[in-house]
Image (spheres, rainbow, N blue to C red):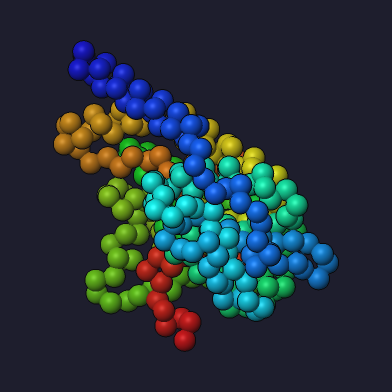
């Protein structure tokens, strides 16, 4: 019992330390000015701004759009915590105040495919989704329900995607939801990972059959709405960190498999379930397509 108490105390202190490191982090480039090359003005005068948070890219990285456009990288070079998923949410949370003059902010990860079309069409697709659902934020969808955590709860968490209004929204997708197109070679991870978490767990029937699950690698919406979303998800992650961290540590001591669930994708999924009036998914892949195991031949 004493051992368990000390473990809980240690993990709680680690969680508090992690939160303090976020609050005390001062070195950043999130106050840098907006860049004209990352800004697109629509025919009706709205400003659309494209953002990335990955120190492996330059300050401005080109996008495959017509006309040519760039993403503003708000990550520092050689940033500590690179690859830490919640770190990207924190960077966006600190940066978003500088985007007050922007109408729509588009955030994308490096493994999300989008572009190759006219920018006016890209914005028109976003408007169509917003008008159909009433949600100001549209996030990328993927074919796998990524819900790490205690194995007994993984299927239960993923089953919430089957509750209203999510099936109705998917059915009402203009043009219909498209099926994922995966690589078909025998070693394809798509054949081994169509369950609720890569580290194991029960199969989820809808996995890899449709783009129906949230992917935090891309989202877009008005800055004020995104600020509210980012604030909620970061608070949720901090509150959820303590119990999950000590459970993970206890599982490691017992030699049990347990995947720490604190990440941006888990938190964003919880936000969508709690605020489905604010966020919907790009079920038809009209805006974004995740690059996870995607068959490149579909672009031929």
Horizontal arrangement in the rendering, residue 109 relative to residue 130 (left or right): left
Front-most of residues 169 and 150: 150
Indicate whether 226 appears above or below 294.
above
Residue 213 appears in view:
no
Name the side, left or right, on which 51 lies relative to 299.
right
Taking 245 as reference, is 128 above or below it? below
Measured as percent of width and height from the top left, residue 114 is found at 55, 70
In terms of depth relative to the viewer, which is nearer, 131 or 208? Answer: 131
Q: How many numbered marks appear?
A: 0
The residue drawn where x is 35% and y is 59% is 194
What x and y, as percent, mark residue 142? 47, 60
Looking at the rendered image, the quarter that the N terminus falls into is top left
**Residue at (81% x, 71% y) in the render:** 43
Q: Which of 48/211 is in front? A: 48
Where residue 17 sits in the image (x, y, percent)?
Answer: 39, 27
- Residue drawn at (61%, 47%) of the image: 31
The part of the image, by quadrant, that contains residue 9 is: top left
Q: Is residue 73 left or right of residue 258?
A: right
Residue 18, quarter of picture? top left
């Amino acid at each position: 019992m004493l051992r368990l108490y000390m473990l809980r105390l240690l993990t709680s202190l680690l969680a508090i330390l992690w939160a303090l490191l976020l609050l005390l982090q001062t070195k950043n480039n999130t106050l840098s000015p907006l860049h004209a090359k990352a800004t697109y003005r629509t025919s009706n005068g709205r400003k659309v701004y494209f953002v990335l948070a990955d120190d492996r890219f330059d300050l401005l990285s080109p996008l495959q759009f017509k006309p040519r456009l760039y993403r503003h990288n708000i990550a520092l070079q050689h940033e500590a915590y690179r690859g830490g998923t919640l770190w990207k949410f924190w960077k966006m949370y600190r940066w978003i105040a500088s985007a007050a003059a922007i109408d729509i902010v588009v955030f994308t990860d490096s493994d999300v495919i989008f572009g190759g079309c006219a920018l006016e069409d890209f914005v028109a697709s976003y408007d169509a989704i917003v008008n159909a659902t009433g949600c100001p934020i549209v996030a990328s969808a993927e074919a796998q329900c990524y819900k790490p955590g205690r194995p007994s709860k993984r299927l239960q968490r993923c089953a919430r995607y089957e509750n209203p209004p999510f099936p109705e929204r998917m059915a009402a997708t203009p043009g219909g939801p498209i099926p994922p197109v995966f690589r078909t070679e025998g070693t394809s991870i798509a054949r081994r990972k169509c369950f609720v978490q890569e580290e194991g767990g029960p199969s989820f029937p809808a996995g890899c059959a449709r783009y129906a699950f949230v992917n935090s690698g891309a989202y877009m919406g008005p800055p004020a709405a995104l600020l509210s979303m980012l604030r909620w998800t970061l608070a949720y992650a901090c509150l959820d960190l303590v119990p999950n961290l000590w459970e993970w540590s206890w599982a490691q001591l017992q030699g049990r498999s347990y995947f720490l669930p604190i990440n941006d994708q888990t938190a964003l999924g919880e936000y969508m379930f709690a605020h489905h009036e604010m966020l919907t998914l790009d079920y038809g892949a009209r805006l974004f397509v995740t690059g996870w195991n995607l068959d490149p031949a579909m672009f031929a």
